[in-house]
Amino acid sequence: MTAALGLVALAGPQAAPAAPVTGPAALHWSTCPAGSDAPRGTYCATLKVPLDHARPNGRQIKLTLSMAGDLHAPRTLVVNPGGPGEPGIGTAKLVWSSLPEDVGSAYNVVSFDPRGVGASTPVSCGDTSKLIKHPAAPYAPATAAQEQARRTVAREVAEQCSTHVKDLLPYITTENAARDMDRIRAAFHRDKLDYLGYSYGTRLGATYATLFPGHTGRMILDSVVDPAVTTYGSQYEQDPALQHRAGQFFAWAAEKDATYHLGGSQAKVSAAWDAVRTKLAAHPAAGRAGSAELDDLLASAMYTDQVWGDVAQAVSDYRRGNASTLLGATDQLALGGVDPAQLAYNCADDAWPRDWATWHRDTAAAAPKAPLFAWLNTWYSAPCAYWKAPTAKPVKIGSVKVPPVLLLQAKDDPATPVVGARRMQQALSGSRLVVAGGGNHGQYLFDGNTCMDRAGNGYLLTGKLPAENATCPASPAP
């Protein structure tokens, strides 16, 4: 899940204004690093940036950039796929090849692995496989001992991350990543940064615009993070939105009862799902997929309805005695384990409650309205309660006059609920918001929604925002 992940705000390194860049760095393009997810036709380069932007001549770290399109195109579009901590060097070719010809000829597309991620200077928590075991205990603790066991794992994850990269963790922040993007802008000899950010990438882009309003060009923020709450608070916005989206999935499966045989109404599908959870909790499939693994599968499916058929089929097969499809899906998710970069950004970007009683109280209050997701979301971010790195001083998005941007959002997006997009528009005065029906996370170019694509394409071509806020119909359900 996109982590939506305080009482004690630790003093963090104070970021100075961006150091002047005396001249664009020379970028040398060649093949991308072995093992990266960059597809053929993508070229990569490296760029040195300060670990601490307050000390521009101090320790330098590496960013790995990727590019697709014509290096000499009139404009450069920098893209971030979200996360935080999501590798980006595979995104440039994906976006550029999805643009219509007139937009693609106007831009080359650049993406990058942000600091702490992948082929850039990475953070690591070492081997966490001994900490994260499968089948995992049910997310909602039935006893105090079960809750304590999960707290122990969260603490051990935080301690292990600190042991491996203690020197890096204070500097893996959204503000520093935004300052890195200004170095990328300068390296491409651009006066303005044109930018497309998805999910967490909207926070990164809005932070950039706040820090560098004079360098902010055409900016699309798609599936918008709420700028008015902390990452701790935003998980409690996610919980009911995820539960609502799950209801939509169950209703969709009910319409296709002849295919999946999960029940002819939303309530019957929900009951069938709960029965499968109960059975897996008691008898994990193949000894490794229990109720928590099924919950992970459901949470991952809330991002896009394009995978709903696969998930429904996996559960349908399991009910008929064939667990192979379900195991294939849950095994793939289990490979993810701990995401060090995502934790590093989330835990350092905002203050988190250090008293577990606060977490327990808030999650217990959220659970009745989001029984499938409240405890899952809490445990996902629980290492932040024990994180060893200091908390960064937050950048207040929109605290200065920022050029207006284009905001794209799905009405029922569970990962970044629509309330966040509306608050972002308030923070970035003059911006325009286009809301699509449906709930798929990530609209522009990747949801097959011609109305949303038309809004994004027109803005990138002309720089002109819609005259007013607008709505688009949902893309067709699968």
Image (spheres, helix red, strand yellow):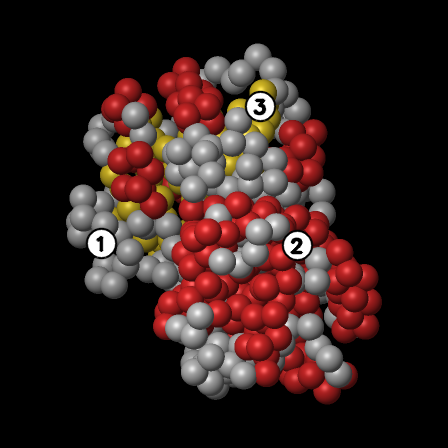
Q: CA distance from mark 2 to mark 3?
A: 30 Å
Residue at left offset 70%, top offset 51% = 240
Label 1 crowd (10 A; few <14 / some 14-19 / many >=20)? many
**Camera-side residue of 151 and 436:** 436
**Residues tagged 1 and 3 counted as in contact (Cβ below 8 A):** no
Q: Along the polypeptide, which appears first: circle 1 or circle 3?
A: 1
Within the image, what quadrant is residue 33 found in? bottom left
Give the secondary structure at mark 1: loop
Q: Position of residue 99 (x, y in %)?
A: 31, 30
Dot 3 amino acid type: Thr
Nearer the observer, disc 2 or disc 3? 2
Residue picked out by circle 1:
32
- Judge the density around disc 3: few (<14), some (14-19), many (≥20) Cα neighbours within 10 Å: some
Residue 308 image point, x, y percent: 46, 52
Name which residue lies at 58% across and 77% down.
279
Q: Of discs 2 and 1, which sits in the foreground?
A: 2
Left or right position of 366 against 384 = right
Secondary structure of the residue carrying tag 3 is strand
Distance of mark 2 from mark 1, alpha carbons?
Answer: 49 Å
Q: Residue at x 57, y 23 (%)?
A: 471
Residue of label 3: 471
- Identify the mark at residue 138; answer none if there is no mark: none
Q: Earlier in the sequence, mark 2 or mark 3?
A: 2
* Vertical comparison of 137 with 269: above or below: below
Task: Rate crowding at label 2 as few (under 14), some (14 to 19) or many (20 or more) other CA atoms within 10 Å.
Answer: some
| Quadrant into which the C terminus falls | top left
Camera-near label (1 vs 3) is: 3
Residue under label 2, please give it. 267
Residue 457 in percent (x, y) is at 40, 23
